Amino acid sequence: MTHAENTRSRRNATVTEVVLPGVVEPEGLEVRTRPMPAPGSGEVLLQMEATGVSFAEQQMRRGKYYDQPAFPFVPGYDVVGTVVEAGPGVDSGLLGRRFAAMLKTGGWADRLLVTAVDLVPVPAGVDPAEAETLVVNGITAWQMLHRDARIRAGQTVLVHGANGGVGSTLVQLALLAGARVIGTASPRHHEALRARGVVPVDYRAPGLADRLRAAAPHGVDAVFDHVGGAGIVDSFRLLAPGGTLVSYGTAATRDTPGSSRLPVFLLFGRLALWNVLPNRRRATFYNIWAGKRRAAQFRSRTRADLIQVLALLADGSLTAPVAARIPLDRAAEALRLAESGTVAGKVVLTPVP
C-alpha cells in the first residue's frame, strides 16, 4: 500500500483503547476512540490480537506500581498482534506476520504503535492468547530461574503463588529443568499442582513456615517470592546454604494505603542487609527492565529468552492456561475477574468483535 493510499484509508480510521484516568475501581476505566496513528521511523502499526491483564495493572489502578506513568494513560504490559503497516526504515517483510512485544504500558488498544526492533516472532500455529500469557510471565520466569537462581537438576525450589501467571510458568520451567518443586496456593488448586508433580502447600492455613520447613527439612535451593511484606523473612530462612531468594514483587502491600515506593525501599534494604551478613545465602530483587539503559544488550537478552519460552510452548513442553478471553471494551470486567483470585491462568483481552 502506497503512502497516499495509507493516508486515504486512515482518514476515518480510529483506534479503540482503554484509558486509566486515575486511582479508580475497575469500573472507572474509560473506553475511548481516537484517530489511528501512522507509524514513524522504525515503528510498525500492530493489530492487537491479545493483550493481558497482569498484576502490574492491578497495582497501577491503585497508583501503587513503582514507576508507572502519570495519569491518564493506557495500560497493557504486553501484546501479541499482526503487523498491518510499517513505517519508514522498517522491513516490509514484517507485514502480515504475528509478533509479541513487551511494552509496560499501551497494550490495551486494538491498534498500537510498536518499535520494530522490540518485536519477537510468534511461532506458527501458536494461539495468540496463549502466546500473550507467556510474554512478561515467560520472560520473568525464565530469567529468574535460569539467570538469577541458576537452578540445576536435583535441586529443590519453592514457588509462592504456584497457580498464578508467573508462578505456574516457573513451576513448569523448574520441572523441565529437573528440579523438585514446592508450591504455595489455595486448596482449590492443589489437585492440579499435584498432577504436575508439585508438592502443594496451603498459604492461608496457620503455620505456613513450619509446613514449608516440613516439606523441605534441609532447606530449599531457591525461593521465588512475589509477596514481599513480613513473609519475606520466612522465605529467606527457608534457604539451604548456598541458596538464592529471588524477590519480584510486593503483593502483600497492594491494598495498603500510602506511598507505592516505601514498601519497595524497605524490601531493598532488607535484601541488601542479608547480602552483607555472613550467612552463605543470597537475596536478589528481580526487575524485568534491569539493564534497559544498555538497550542493545537488553533487547538481545529479552528476545533470546522469550524465543526459548515460545519454542517450548510451540512444541507442547510448556502450557499457557488462559483463564478468560474478554473483549477490550469489557476491560473493567476483565480486571475485576483478574483481581478476584478465583481463576487459574491469565485473563486476556481480545479485540472487540
Image (cartoon, rainbow, N blue to C red):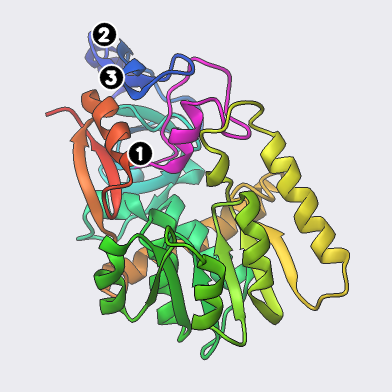
Residue 109 percent coordinates (x, y):
33, 27
* Disc with the residue nearer the chain's start (1 vs 2): 2
Of circles 2 and 3, the one toward us is 3
Q: Nearer the viewer, residue 206 or 63?
A: 206
Q: Which region shows up in magenta? A: 53-79
Position of 157 relative to 345 (above/below): below
Q: Which mark is residue 11?
A: 2
Q: Which mark is residue 274?
A: none
**The disc labelled 1 sits on which kind of residue?**
Glu
Residue 16 within the segment the image draws in magenta = no
Mark 1 lies on a secondary structure that is helix
Quadrant in which residue 311 is drawn: bottom left
Residue 70 within the segment the image draws in magenta = yes
> Where's the N terminus, which quadrant?
top left
| Residue that appears at 75% across and 49% down | 268
Mark 3 lies on a secondary structure that is strand
Residue density around tag 3, few if under 14, some if 14–19, many if 20 or more, within 10 Å: many
The residue under label 1 is 339
**The disc labelled 3 sits on which kind of residue?**
Thr
> What's the CA distance linking mark 1 and mark 2?
38 Å
Q: Which mark is residue 16?
A: 3
Residue 203 percent coordinates (x, y):
44, 61
